[in-house]
Image (cartoon, rainbow, N blue to C red):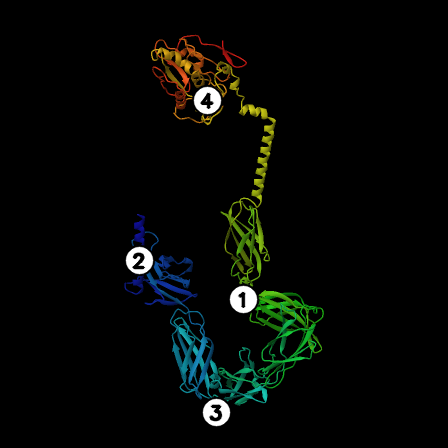
Amino acid sequence: MTIKVKMKTSLGFVLLIFTYYRCAIGDIPNCAKIEPDSAQKIPVAIGQDFTATCYLDASSEYSADNIEWLLGDATVPRELYKKLNKSAVSVTVKVRSDMRDPLICKAHKKSLSYQDQCTYGIFLHKGYPPLKPENLQCVALQDGKSINPYLTCWWDPGKRNPMFTTNYTLKANNGEKTFSAVSTEPLCHNLTINLDTFPHYMTIRVWVEVNNVLGSMKSDELFNDAENFVKPNPPSDVKLFPEANFPKSLMVIWTHPIHETTFKLKYNIRYCQAGSSIWEEVPQNYTKMYVESYRLQFLQPYTDYVVQMRCINQKNIGFWSDWSPNATVRTPEAQPESMPDLWRVYDENNETLVKLIWKDPVKSNGKILVYDITVEGNGKDPERYSLNSKEQQLHIKGEKIFIKLTANNSVGISPMAALVIPRRGKELRVGVENVSWWVQDGQLCLDWLPPSRSPFEFLLEWVSVPDGKRDWQRVSAQATTSLYSVCLKGNFEPFIRYNISVCPIYRDKHSSRLGRQVTVGAYLKQGPPLRGPTVEASATQKNSVHLKWEEIPVASQRGFLTNYTIFYKSGDNEQLIVVGPDVHSYKLTGLKSANQYVVHIMASNVGGSVNGSDSSLYTKKYDDGEIEMIVVLVCLGFLFVFLFIVMLSLKKREVIKKRFWPQVPDPSHSTIANWSPDCPTRADTPKEATQPDVSVVEVDMFDGKSLCEEDKTVLPLKKDKYFSEEHSSGIGGSSCMSSPRQSVSDSDEGDSCQTTASTVQYSSVVASGYKGQTPSLQAPVFTRSESTQPLLDSEEHPEHLLEGSGHRRSTYFRRGRGLEQLQMQEGEEPSCSSLNFSSMEEEDTPTLTEDLPGPAPGYMPQQSGYRPQ
């Protein structure tokens, strides 16, 4: 609903404006009318009051009380209304440039009514009336030998745009006829009138008229003789002539630009030295006559001069002509009027060598052809030199030398310049104090305090540091001056360092003696250095590093360095240290060990800063000597521990001996040695030294059916050594009490030797009768040695060795194949059948196939071993 209302309102406003426009142009019958009225826009002046009156038609049903004024869609306040009668109301508004159009008169009922509204409107054109032209001037130019009839005038139209079409009319009257020129250009400020013929000796009246729809203005009139509007051409053919006998003067000659019958002229001459912008004018009283030449005097000999001229009516009315083109000439030569500017430069490597340098005399008055030098004071006759150059090297053979210098041109000789030069290092006279520099208007300036004794003059010398170019100037001393301030007259460049020296010069009779020279550095302008320093790391330690960098060359500093800033970064942690400009090495401390650092140095001056290149460094994990100290401490620790162990071992040797080497009984003292007396003591052989491990196997003992009765009787008796050697016990790998024996192993070949730590044989099994006796059917008898080692299971249970009616089984120590062969070689052959041994797997503990009942023998501990009880 809101959208529909807005659309209807906008459409109604457009229709209302269209209706207002139709009423204003008279397209439809009007019930009201506004005065003033026009089919075009009505011009009104911005800033002024505008009054309009609305008249209702006599047949209108509305009255003056129903009239409302609007500017565009804005209602005009009723305070501005004025009721004239029952059907007329006027309104007065202040015209503004932003005021809306149109101005509308609307008659309507305030309450709801079905009567048609009565409206009428007018459009306004806002602008300004013209301003009065100011400063009117007119000129008539010379054309050839006569005056041009065209009169050109110009004025100030003001800066306000009228916003209406404005006519500018220039008018001139010579008493007989009025001439005019018109322009409609906005803010027109000049026009030209054709006078047909220039009215010589007549009076001319000139003015400007300006008008538009809001009004008109007229300028002030110019009322003068026609000659007051003339501007002649400059003098022609201006020439300069030097005179040989007058080196300080020039003759100037020219031609009149216009004939004197038209009017006479007077002239103005100015001149200056070539290259200078400072002109000197000849007083006009000297050239006011109608002449065509003039002599310039008091000029400098052998100097280029530039001359210009201009002219004006001799009555001093009208306009000056333009300056003539330059005329240039050089004055003749004359004898030099000033002495050469002599100075000296000491050699830095040789105290007796000095170089003389000089400049031409300020007033040389010609081209210098030769320089004459006289050197006195070397202990010989004076030395004379004639040179074309401006420098000469000399050796000081004595304490000092006396120099005389003159300059010669084609006319004469200059005054003599004299200088006393002492040997370098000799004490000089007092110098100046508190020398400082500053910059003013692009020039280097110096301040200094003079010495207590006033010198004759001061010599200011400056040297360009990069290329060594040298220049100087002299300043006259004044007795009443307590502080000197002088700007140097040199071509100084920015960002270049200059060493500036101030040296007082004392005059003694006919020579000059030097005072102590004071030097300061200066810049015309300072800027950031061209590059930063390159840093090098040395003497790197665990927590410190020594940095070193070279000084930036003076040519790259571009200013006085204020400081160096050292930046060092590890990871994201960056730190900085600021040092002075004279520091070129620094030791960084507080660094982390075994860490990488990135270091760069920033150089700064008044003009800015610049960073040097990055340099990476690594700190050590250990400082120098730290590893050696650690090694020494560890070695001392090991030595201390070793000595402690040795001392402890010596003190506890009995305990250590019992712990690592326990006492083992000697089998030779065993009682089995008495039981087996026929066992010889054998010497150790290499074969017996390699005793195999003792293995326990089961063997099937033959019964009576296997062998003949003879063999049964003889077999146990043939070799009792067989059983005693092969089944006897021993300690530490020995059998037969004192002799080591080879035991039977799983392999057929002999194994490695057994020591006392190897498997120990405990006993031998006696399976037959003793020494040839007929064995009985009783169970095998075990005999025990005096060894303290634990008993074998077969020794503790001998009853397990018997069987009922079958084979007889027993546990024995299997012997090797070599032992069997040895027995065969001894002639032990069975008569009926051979012995059969049944092999079985090795076991850690011997086992019996049958358990025979019987009491287990008991053992009682004895002093020499165990014995059955």
For marks 3 and 1, give the CA distance: 61 Å
Query: Which residue is disc 4 drawn over?
Result: 741
Query: Which residue is disc 1 drawn over?
Result: 494
Query: Which residue is disc 3 drawn over?
Result: 261
- Which of marks 4 and 2 precedes in the sequence? 2
Badge 1: few (under 14), some or many (20 or more) residues near its Cα, within 10 Å? few
What label does residue 14 carry, if any?
2
* Residue 142 sits in quarter: bottom left
Do we see residue 438 in this rendering?
Answer: yes
Query: Is there a contact, CB below 8 Å, between mark 1 and mark 4?
Result: no
Q: Which structural element holds mark 1? A: loop
For marks 2 and 1, give the CA distance: 72 Å
Do we see residue 296 in this rendering?
Answer: no
560 left or right of 771? right
Q: Which structural element holds mark 4? A: loop
Query: Is there a contact, CB below 8 Å, between mark 2 and mark 1?
Result: no
For marks 4 and 3, give the CA distance: 172 Å
Circle 1: residue type: Pro
Circle 3: residue type: Thr
Image point (47%, 23%), residue name: 758
